[in-house]
Every structure is written in structure tokens, then in C-alpha cells.
């Protein structure tokens, strides 16, 4: 079968790259002499559909296997992929557990996760199997911080309630006591965690809304920018929770942070405070949050992430003062394309024998 002629890989315009149907790359010069021989392209298994420019680039650069339909992979599908491909491109919907990684034979040498969080991958098990793991930090920071501000605004200003009322044809017109919320400008925001997204939220909250920002980070790292912005640290999480109007969670999901926001911690919060979660669902104890919403101790909540997604604790649906979004933090064309580019950069470096820029294991 004739091989398809593709664009030059040299950038000089005098060479051309040709891909044979069996996944080999041939380099031709203008006189079509093969340079210097055939090189196999790494086989890359992608678990979910990605944005078209990224899928196209993956197909051009690698022997990419991309599914026709867009479904999360079950453990068996993941094991087959790990036995079949040199690289696995996965997402947070794929649970790469120690059991999954115990698959035999294991061909995969790199797992390039499409996303910043890595709690869906057992990093210790990956290390034990000699598998490199990468993620896609930085490029989704601004979009996730934008969405955090949106949840703060929606929860404080009752935007979801207002929109539902209007759509239901139930709006009786302007009146002085209609859907009164809480002023965002000048209120106090508490950041749990001080990573990239927390710092981007602080820039927006301070620069855009004149909020006072406090933070808590037990490791005391990455706080220089927050201090420069005028944010102040709280020595303990309980001290932070008791000193702010809005609590926004920006910590990873780890054994240490699971159920971090439990009944005791919620009791430390001011009465009427607002809880925002764009981190991971299992950082909060849903039962405790629901109880605090029912008692009025929590004034409102804005949630983008849930324990056991796409399932969620259906009791949240009963509260008008809870804004519920379906994990949209990084859901912009710009972020999703940049995340894909980051995956490709990591794979390219790895298969060139270099250290991938976003290596986490
Ligand atoms: C991540 O990358 O971890 C985000 O949750 C995806 O939006």
C-alpha cells in the first residue's frame, strides 16, 4: 500500500516525512532517497476523545489509537491498553489503580494524564512498575480560577435561583427585597491551599473585587506571591475558617485531605459562610455539608466537583442556595487545547529520551 506523504519535519523544506500504514516513519529528501532508515513510531493509546487539533497532532506524530466513542474506560480496557501501547493518555475518569497496573504483559512506559490532578493514578504503583507519569499543570489555572470566581459570585448573589425563577415564568418584577444576596466586593475569602489555582483566585479576588484574602497552607510554601498581593496567612485551618465569609478549597485529594471539611470544621466557619469547591469532591464530607445547609449554618455553596463523579449526593439538589456545576473548571477551548499540547510535549520529550517537563512520577 502506498505510504501517505506528510509535511516536512525538518522545518527546512527540503525533507519530507512519510508514514507507512503499519506505523513506521520514513524520512525522504527531495530526491526521495530514504534518510537514513525506518523508525517505528511509539504507539499511544488515548482513552477519551480530545479536541480535534490535538487528536490530529497525536495521529501525525505517533501511532495513535483514539476511540470512536467517548466513554470512560473500565479496568479491563485500561489493562488491554497498558499491554498494547508504549504510552497511555488518560484522564481523571480513568482509575489507574495498583490492580490495573498489575496487568501482564505491561508495554506502557509513560502515562501522560490529560489534567492537573493525579489522584486517579496510583503513583507509587506506577513508580514500582517503572512507569513515568506526567500531568498538565499551569495551562488550566486561569480558567479554573475564573470558574471559582463565577461560583463565588453566583453563590453570594443567588444567580442560580434568579435564573431558575425567570425561566419558570415566576418573576414578579423588581422589588426592594427580591432575592437579596451578599456583597462580594470587600468580603473576606479564605483559600485552603496555596497552589497555582489558589494564587490565581487571589489575584482576581484582590485585584478585581477588592476582597480581603486569607490563606492556610500547612507546608508554608508558594506563599510569597500571596503575601505580595496583601493576603495574610492563618496558622491553622480552623483559624482560617473562622475568619472568612467565603471558603474556597484548592488542595489536592490525598489521604490527608479526604473529608477535610467535616462537621467539626464546618462548625468552625462563620454562620452564613459560603463554601466553594473546585478541587475534588472527596475533600468534603457531603453529609456534613448537607446538614449545615439544612441548619442554615452554611449560607450557600458552589460546587464543581463531586465524590464518585458523575454521581453526586442528590440531597444537594434540594437546596436552592447551592450552585451545582458539572466539573467545568478547565472546560474552555483554550485550556483543553493547551492541555493536549502539554500531553504531546511530555510524550515528545519522553520518546526523545529527555525528561518530560511535567513529570510527577
Ligand atoms: C484537573 O485537571 O485535575 C481538573 O480537575 C480538570 O478540569
Image (spheres, rainbow, N blue to C red):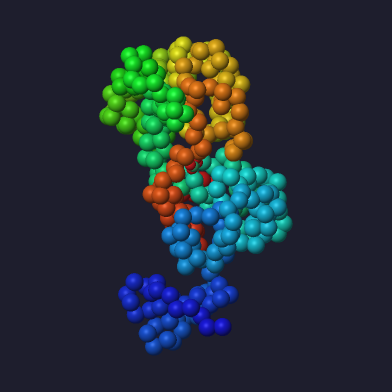
Q: For this rendering, which residue is in front, 265 or 317? A: 317
Residue at position x 48%, y 60% in the image: 55
How many numbered marks appear?
Answer: 0
Residue at position x 40%, y 74% in the image: 7
Q: For this rendering, which residue is in front, 49 or 3? A: 49
Q: Position of residue 259 (x, y in %)?
A: 58, 25
Q: For this rendering, which residue is in front, 353 or 275? A: 275
Residue at position x 37%, y 85% in the image: 30
Give the left or right position of residue 35, taking residue 90 as reference. Answer: left
The N terminus - image quarter: bottom right
Asked if one can make out residue 232 in the rendered structure from this viewpoint, the answer is no
Q: Position of residue 337 (x, y in %)?
A: 42, 53
Up-down relation of residue 80 to residue 114 (above or below): below
Asked if one can make out residue 16 in the rendered structure from this viewpoint, the answer is yes
Q: Position of residue 45 (x, y in %)?
A: 58, 59
Residue at position x 60%, y 24% in the image: 315
Up-down relation of residue 154 to residue 122 (above or below): above
Q: Position of residue 351 (x, y in %)?
A: 50, 62
Amino acid at each position: 500500500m502506498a505510504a501517505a506523504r506528510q509535511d516536512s519535519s525538518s522545518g527546512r523544506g527540503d525533507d519530507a516525512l512519510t508514514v507507512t500504514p503499519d506505523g513506521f516513519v520514513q524520512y525522504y529528501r527531495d530526491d526521495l532517497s530514504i534518510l537514513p532508515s525506518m523508525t517505528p513510531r511509539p504507539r499511544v493509546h488515548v482513552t477519551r476523545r480530545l479536541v480535534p487539533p490535538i487528536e490530529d497532532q497525536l495521529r501525525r506524530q505517533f501511532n495513535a489509537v483514539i476511540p470512536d466513542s467517548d466513554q470512560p474506560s473500565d479496568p479491563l480496557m485500561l489493562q488491554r491498553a497498558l499491554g498494547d501501547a508504549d504510552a497511555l493518555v488518560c484522564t481523571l475518569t480513568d482509575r489507574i489503580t495498583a490492580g490495573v497496573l498489575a496487568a501482564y504483559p505491561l508495554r506502557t512506559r509513560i502515562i501522560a494524564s490529560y489534567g492537573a490532578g493525579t489522584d486517579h493514578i496510583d503513583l507509587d504503583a506506577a513508580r514500582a512498575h517503572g512507569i513515568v507519569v506526567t500531568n498538565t499543570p499551569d495551562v488550566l489555572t486561569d480558567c479554573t480560577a475564573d470558574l471559582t470566581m463565577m461560583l463565588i459570585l453566583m453563590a453570594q448573589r443567588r444567580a442560580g435561583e434568579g435564573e431558575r425563577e425567570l425561566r419558570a415564568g415566576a418573576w414578579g418584577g423588581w422589588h426592594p427585597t427580591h432575592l437579596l444576596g451578599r456583597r462580594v466586593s470587600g468580603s473576606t475569602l479564605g483559600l485552603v491551599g496555596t497552589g497555582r489555582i489558589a494564587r490565581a483566585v487571589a489575584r482576581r479576588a484582590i485585584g478585581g473585587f477588592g476582597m480581603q484574602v486569607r490563606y492556610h497552607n500547612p507546608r508554608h510554601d508558594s506563599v510569597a506571591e500571596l503575601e505580595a498581593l496583601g493576603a495574610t496567612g492563618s496558622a491553622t485551618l480552623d483559624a482560617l475558617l473562622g475568619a472568612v465569609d467565603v471558603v474556597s478549597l484548592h488542595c489536592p485529594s490525598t489521604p490527608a485531605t479526604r473529608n477535610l471539611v467535616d462537621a467539626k470544621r464546618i462548625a468552625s466557619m462563620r454562620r452564613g459562610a459560603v463554601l466553594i469547591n473546585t478541587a475534588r469532591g472527596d475533600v468534603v464530607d457531603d453529609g456534613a455539608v448537607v446538614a449545615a445547609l439544612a441548619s442554615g449554618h452554611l449560607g450557600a455553596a458552589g460546587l464543581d466537583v463531586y465524590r464518585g463523579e458523575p454521581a453526586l449526593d442528590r440531597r444537594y439538589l434540594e437546596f436552592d442556595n447551592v450552585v451545582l456545576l458539572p466539573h467545568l473548571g478547565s472546560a474552555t477551548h483554550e485550556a483543553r487545547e493547551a492541555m493536549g499540547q502539554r500531553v504531546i510535549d511530555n510524550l515528545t520529550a519522553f520518546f526523545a529520551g529527555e525528561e518530560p517537563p511535567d513529570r510527577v512520577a
